[in-house]
């Protein structure tokens, strides 16, 4: 099982929360859990062990959310949909 999606989700979380350092731990049972690392290097468990997909959803929901980027084409399409529904 590849952990690339999970590690990328943790990297995004660390970018959204620059004052905290999160890390992931993968157990021998292939379950992931999130830990918070303090200045002394001690780890505090933040989540229970989960499967990869569940872990990625959990991590993506934590912290401040980045605003969705919307292109001009998307905006014009939404405006067109609103006009046709009216």
Image (cartoon, rainbow, N blue to C red):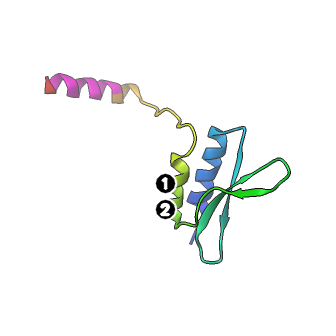
Residue drawn at x 53%, y 64% is 52
Residue denoted by label 1: 57
**Figure quadrant of the N terminus:** bottom right
The answer to whether residue 36 is above or below residue 18 is: below
Image quarter of residue 74 = top left
Local packing at callout 2 (Cα closer than 10 Å; few below 14, some 14-19, many 20+) is few
Comparing 55 with 38, the one in front is 38
* Residue 67: image location, x then y, percent: 49, 32
Q: Does dot 1 land on a helix, a strand or a loop?
A: helix
Instruction: Report the residue that reaches farthest toward the bottom.
Output: 29
Q: Which of 25 and 70 is in front in this view?
A: 25
Marks 1 and 2: CB-CB under 8 Å? yes
Q: Which mark is residue 53?
A: 2
Q: Image point 62% across, 52% down: which residue?
A: 10
Give the image location of residue 85, x and y in percent.
14, 27
- Does the magenta run of residues contain 40? no
The boundaries of the magenta stretch are 75-84
In the picture, measured across the screen, residue 43 lies left or right of residue 81, that is: right
**Residue 83 falls inside the magenta stretch:** yes
Q: What element carries label 2?
A: helix
* Crowd class of label 1 (few under 14; some 14 to 19; many from 20; radius 10 Å): few
User: Looking at the picture, does residue 59 appear above or below residue 66?
Assistant: below
Quarter residue 28 falls in: bottom right
Residue 44's x, y, as percent? 72, 56
Image quadrant containing the C terminus = top left
Q: How far apart are marks 1 and 2 (CA)?
A: 6 Å
């Amino acid at each position: 099982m590849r952990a690339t999606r999970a590690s990328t989700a943790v990297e995004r979380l660390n970018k959204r929360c620059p004052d905290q350092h999160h890390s992931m731990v993968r157990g021998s049972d292939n379950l992931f859990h999130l830990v918070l690392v303090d200045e002394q290097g001690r780890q505090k468990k933040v989540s229970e062990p989960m499967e990869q997909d569940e872990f990625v959803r959990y991590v993506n929901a934590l912290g401040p959310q980045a605003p969705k980027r919307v292109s001009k084409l998307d905006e014009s399409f939404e405006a067109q949909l609103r006009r046709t529904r009216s």
